Each structure stands twice: as C-alpha cells, then as structure tokens.
Image (cartoon, rainbow, N blue to C red):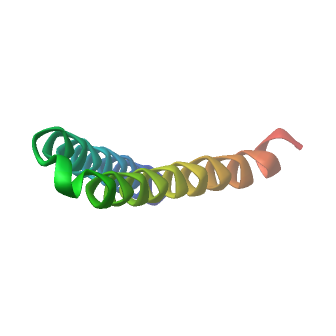
Amino acid sequence: MNGQINGHAILENVRRYRGIASLYRQTAAFRPGQSWSLLEQARDWEARALSELEAYFAARIDYAAPLAA
C-alpha cells in the first residue's frame, strides 16, 4: 500500500514537472529574446520528470523481483 501511495506521488511530480516545462516552452514562443534560456529551463524540468519516472520504474522492478522468485 505504501508503495502505491509513493507511486502516485511520483507520478504527480512527473505531471507537475512536465506542466512546468510546457509553460517554459510556451513562454519561449512569445519571448524570442529569452527563448534559449527558457528552453533550457524546459529541458531541465523534463530531465527532472524523466529522473522521477526512472526512479518509479526502478522501484517497481525492485519490488516485483522477489515476488517473481
């Protein structure tokens, strides 16, 4: 049960991080002078989301491995 709650929190973080990245990309479209900086920020937030997803699936694999044995 605790793993499920943590999984939901991780997926909520991923959703939030990707939303923030999307806002940076949208802002970059309307501010050409700052677009490189804004797009770099978007990449950073996407990297955070990817890191969270990797942790989520690694935890699921670690949890499932003893059950499969």
Q: How many marks?
A: 0
Which residue reaches farthest right?
69
- The answer to whether 51 is drawn above or below residue 8 in the figure is below
x and y percent of residue 29 in the render? 18, 38
Q: Which residue is most to the front?
A: 33
Looking at the image, residue 21 sits to the left or right of residue 29; the answer is right
**Percent position (x, y) of residue 5?**
37, 54
Q: Residue at x 48, y 55 (%)?
A: 47
Name the side, left or right, on which 66 lies relative to 41: right
Q: Residue at x 17, y 46 (%)?
A: 23
Which of the two residues, 29 or 14, is positioned nearer the viewer here?
A: 29
Locate residue 13: give its quadrant: bottom left
**Residue closer to the observer: 60 or 44:** 44
- Left or right of 2? Residue 54 is right
- Give how far across and how far down residue 10 sits, in percent: 40, 54
User: Which residue corresponds to the image point at 20% horizontal and 46% vertical from the top-left?
Assistant: 28
Residue visible at 73% across and 55% down in the picture: 62
What is the x, y in percent for residue 15? 29, 44
The C terminus lies in quadrant? top right
